[in-house]
Image (cartoon, helix red, strand yellow):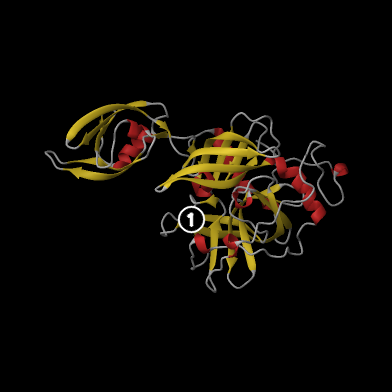
Amino acid sequence: MDRREDWPEEERPADAPPLADGSWSVPATPGPTPPTGSLLRRRLPLGLAALCLVGAGSGLTLLLTSGTSSVPSSTAGLDAVSPGRGALSPSLTRRIARRLDRAVVDVNSVIETPSGPADVAGTGMVLTPGGIVVTNNHVVEEAKTIKVTVNPGHLQYAAQFVGADPSADVAVLKIVGAAPLSTVALGSSARVEVGEGVLAFGNSLGLGGTASVTSGTVSALGRSITATSETGADAEHLSGMIETDAPIAPGNSGGPLVNDRGRVVGMNTAAASVAGSGSAVAFAIPIDRVEAVVRAIERGTREPGLVLGRSAYLGIEGTTVKLVGPPPRGAVNVVQVEPGTPAESAGLEAGDVITAFDGIQVHSMPQLSSLISALHPGAEVTLGFEAGGTARHVVVELVAGPAA
């Protein structure tokens, strides 16, 4: 993957990068600014700032904190702000929008929640004509299915999970069966300067269609943000982020932040508003870091922190329990069985106790998870468990699990 393209200077209009060719077919005006309905206008308590991941859907129950204050993402919002002095002109914005429209895709995934399936919407950037797409990991995390919509034409394709670095919030997908696709051109985030104009593209509010585009300036570099669940657990720290006042909204996660030459310098990831200030800020992962993760996944070697492909999956949630002897030993108590999984097909139910996995005695839930993850989807194993005091053995075929 190498999308760093130089446009010939003689083909470049005075105020804009050239179009790729005459085949680009997009509206002559940029996409709409995110709507200002109740979803975006909710206020925060005075003096508090909240950062929220900008994937849209009930599957994203994360909040982000800055400094010592934290507010649930359900109360976070964005207020549109006037572009700074470095903002790009309308004519330049239109030209860049034409260049990028076909290379920015909608990413829609379905995750399983305690209340049933839920939809999550985000954005992706096409990196290769063959359909390699990069997005935020939180857009596809634990996804059962992933679909990508390519514009123009609203053509929808299934997407395969290729790999991810969850700690960097970067995931790579492969579009299945798409024709040769237009691609984004990557710039260098190392060259980004405070005050320069940028544009943010994305699937605003998960509405689909032509990507929305907002303009602003880079307001800071090297920012650090922290994401946690609503309970304050599972903290995720992202550092070295690009801060901009280009407004972004839920659904923009994974979309490109581009410079005045239409080159991607960051991946839109989080947004915040400060109560009573009338200001809004957004945060993007530097594209140099994104590209490094993509290249590591392309190499296909097991590296710390990387998840490659989908691992084998049984479909249970369980806890370690101690069985009375003689001799006393550990086992796994089944707390929940996911519908439509090998565990359900095997007849497992909540309250059953797993004692063996393919001839290996099971002592704990971490051990069972490790045994499963060491196998590939499609592997057949013999599961030993106790149900109602009766010992049973059943052969099950593991399937591909959710995305990272």
Residue 327 lies, with reference to residue 249, above or below; the image says: above
- The picture quadrant where one finds residue 220 is bottom right
Mark 1: which secondary structure? strand
Q: Is residue 188 visible?
A: no
Residue 387 lies, with reference to residue 253, above or below; the image says: above
Q: Residue 404's x, y, as percent? A: 47, 42
Residue under the point 38% across and 30% down: 398
Residue under the point 74% across and 57% down: 197
Q: Residue 162's x, y, as percent? A: 53, 35
Instruction: Kindly identify the amino acid type of the residue bearing the numbered disc 1.
Output: Leu
Q: Residue 5's x, y, as percent? A: 75, 40
Left of 326 or right of it: where is 40? right
Residue placed under numbered mark 1 in the picture:
62
Residue found farthest to the left: 326
Q: Nearer the viewer, residue 311 or 1?
A: 311
Left of 363 or right of it: where is 126? right
Q: Nearer the viewer, residue 297 or 76?
A: 76
- The picture quadrant where one finds residue 364 is top left
Left of 17 or right of it: where is 309? left
Q: Residue 144's x, y, as percent? A: 47, 39
Neighbor class of circle 1 (other Cα within 10 Å; few <14, some 14-19, many 20+) is many
Residue under the point 49% across and 44% down: 141
Q: Is residue 96 visible?
A: yes
